[in-house]
Image: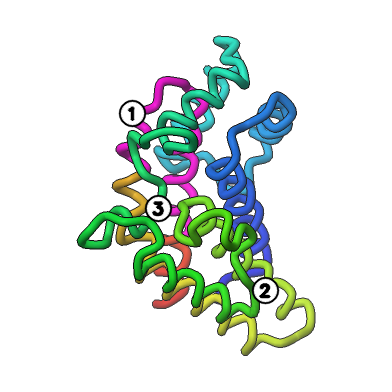
Amino acid sequence: MLTFDQLDAFAAAFSTLGRLQITPATPETIEQVVDLLDEWPEPATGKYTAAGIEAWRTSVARGESASDIHRDHDLLYGISAGAKVAPFESVHRSEEGLVFDEETLEVREQYRRLGLQAPRLNREPDDHIGLELDFLAQACVSALTALEQDAALAAERYVRIATEFTRDHLLVWAPDMLRKAEEAATTDWMRGLEFMTLGAIEAWTGAIEEDAQ
């Protein structure tokens, strides 16, 4: 079973990264994230997380503006036009490459397993990379709450749901999509976001695999 501290760290990382993947960073968001880099929940020992932190610091040093980042985010993910790299699982996995395909509904059902619904239900397809990260954050929070209530079996169930979701959904498409987005990004901020997300997924996958042994 993952420890309380591990679950707390992953909940914080996935929650932050999920929000940044969905909503373009504002000046306030950039300042908040950069202020927390020295205390990032996941250690910067992995190559992706280290590269992400470096890219975010470079973004600030070069003076990339929030409008620059917004434009890059928009062009990458197709917020207002065609996407360079679609951020939806269904586009990458369905035969027709459509949004709101079978995979979208499968992710929606996974939220129901936690007793929740996607936070942007009917406004954003449930299988957006940001919402899949949010799902893992919510699963970790649910496990933390169970542990605080001395409900170890419930905590194990939430971790098992998150592990199955990682195997059946996130790992099938997200790493490849994130690497493509990193290559297509024109700002260091978005490159950093893709690296940081890859790093969090890598660390999480290592933790749950170790836990399963």
Note whether 210 is above or below 54 in the view shown.
below
**The quadrant where residue 40 appears:** top right
Q: Is residue 200 magenta?
A: yes
Stretch in magenta: 178-204
Residue identified by numbered label 1: 184
Residue identified by numbered label 3: 88
Q: Secondary structure at mark 3?
A: loop
**The quadrant where residue 141 appears:** bottom right
The tag earlier along the polypeptide, 3 or 2, is 3
- Name the residue at 42% across, 29% down: 75
**The quadrant where residue 111 appears:** bottom right
Note whether 39 is above or below 90 in the view shown.
above
The tag earlier along the polypeptide, 1 or 3, is 3
Give left or right: position of 93 versus 146.
left
Q: Which mark is residue 142?
A: 2
> Which image quarter is the N terminus in?
bottom right
Q: CA distance from mark 3 to mark 2?
A: 25 Å
Note whether 166 is above or below 9 in the view shown.
below
